[in-house]
Image (cartoon, rainbow, N blue to C red):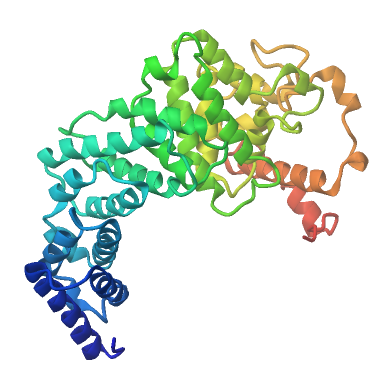
Amino acid sequence: MIHNSGTGAKSSASSLLDRLGHASRTSSLSHDELLAILVNLKLEGRDPNRATVIFSKESLELLVGYGVTPNPLDIRLETLRIIANALLLSPDLRKQFRALPVLVREYKGASADEEFVVSRIMFLLTIEPGTYTSDVLYDLLEYIFLHVMRHAEGDLSACSLPALTETCKLLFNILCKYSNGSPSYDDLIGPLSSTIKRLPRILNSVSCSIISCLLKLPCNADIYFRDEAPTELSEVFFELLSNAVQPQVVDADGLDDTIVPLLLLLRNIFTAARNEQVREYFKAKIFPSEDERSRPLGQSSSLASHLLQIISKPTFMKSREVIYQIMWDGSDHDVSKFIYHIGYGYAVGYLVGHDIPVPEDVLSENVPNFPDNINPVTGQRLENESRSPSLANMTDEEKEREAERLFVLFERMRENGIIDVENPVRTAVQSGRFQELSD
C-alpha cells in the first residue's frame, strides 16, 4: 500500500527500490510484479517531496540497469520514465548522472516510444554545462542522425512526431552549447529538410523544432539551392509563414515568438543565396507586386501585405525587426529602393530606428531616383489615388486596422522628431469620433 504522508511516501519508495535491488541480484520477481513496482515507483517519483530517496546517484544507477536490454520493452519504458521524471525534478541529480554513454549506445536503433523518453533524458542533461564529453558527443551524433533519418525516410506517423520533436530539441541544445570542438552536424541538414517538406504546412511543435535546428546549421548550397529546384525549400518555408500570418490567426497568443525563428531562417537563406532566381523569388514574396499598387500598400491579401500589417502591430516587436531586416536586405540596403518597395509610411520606423538618413523631400513626393507615378508615402500609383476606396466603403475591421496603422505611424514620426503635431488618431479617439469595436 502506498502512503501519502512524507515519511510514509519515503518509506514506500525505499521499499520499492529495495525490492528492485533484491530482484536485480536474484531475479525473484515475475514480469508483472516487476512492472507493478515500476509503475508505483513512477507515481511516487512525480513529487520530489514524496520520494526524495529516488533522487540519488545510487538509485539512478540501479534503475539504469532495468532501462536497458535484455529487459522487455514495457519494463525499459517504465524505468526510463522514472529516470526522466527524476532528472526533471532534481537539477542536482543531472550533475551526478553518469549513465549517459550507456543510453546513447543502447538506443541508437530505438522505437519511437523509446526515442521519445531517451531523447528527453538527454535533453534534460544538456541543461547542465559540461555534461557531454567529446567522446559522448560523437556517439550522440550517430544516435541523432539515425533517428532523424528514420523519420525522414518514412516514420512520420502521429505517434512518432512527439519523438522527433524531442530529438530535435536535444539537437538544438547540443548545437547551442556544444558546437565548439564537437563533431559537425551538417549531415543532418538533408534529412531535416526532407522531413519538413513532408509535414503539413503549419507551425507546430515538430515543424518549429526542425526550423530551430536548421537555423543553427549552415545554409548548405547543395541542399538549399539545388540546380534542378533552387527555390524548393524556400517555397516550403514561405508557405509555413503565409499560413501562420493569415488575418484569422495573426492575433493568436505567442505568434510573435513562434514566427521569429522561421523569419530568421528565411533571412539566412536569402543572405546565403547566390542564385539570382532564388533572390528574385524572395523579393516577389516579401514585397507587394505592381498589381497591388492600385491601393495603398498593405491592403491586399498577399503575404507581403500581411507582413506589412504585422510591422504596424505593436504586439509584434520581435518579428517586426526581422521582417524589416529581410526587406532591407532585399532592397540592397538602398533607401530609395526600400521606400519604393514598402512605402515611406512603413519604411520610416526602420530607417529612423537605425539612424539611416531619410531623404528630406520624401514627404513632398519628390524622392531622388523614385518613379514619378508612385506616391512614396503610401506606395500607391498616383493615378489610382482618386479611386481609392473611401472610408464609407470600408468595413469596420478595415477602418480599425487603418486607424491602428496611422496611429503607430504618427507616433513614430512624432517621437523621432520628423513631425511636431498632435497624433490625429489620438485626437479622434479622445473626441469620441472613434469607438472600439466589440468582439
Q: Residue at x 53, y 30 (%)?
A: 237
Q: Is residue 136 above or below residue 298?
A: below
Q: Residue at x 29, y 25 (%)?
A: 187
Q: Nearer the viewer, residue 3 or 240?
A: 3
Q: Is residue 431 visible?
A: yes
Q: Nearer the viewer, residue 37 or 400?
A: 37
174 left or right of 239 in image: left
Q: Quadrant of residue 168?
A: top left
Q: Is residue 34 above or below residue 67?
A: below
Q: Is residue 354 visible?
A: no
Q: Is residue 29 above or below residue 248?
A: below
145 left or right of 11 in image: right
Q: Residue at x 39, y 43 (%)?
A: 164
276 left or right of 371 in image: left
Q: How many numbered marks have been drawn onto this rendered protein structure?
A: 0
Q: Residue at x 26, y 62 (%)?
A: 75
| Quadrant assignment for the C terminus | bottom right
**Residue placed furthest toward the left:** 25
Residue 2, horizontal then vertical, whole percent? 29, 86
Q: Quadrant of residue 418?
A: top right
Q: Nearer the viewer, residue 380 or 66?
A: 66
| Quadrant assignment for the N terminus | bottom left
Q: Is residue 196 above or below residue 165?
A: above
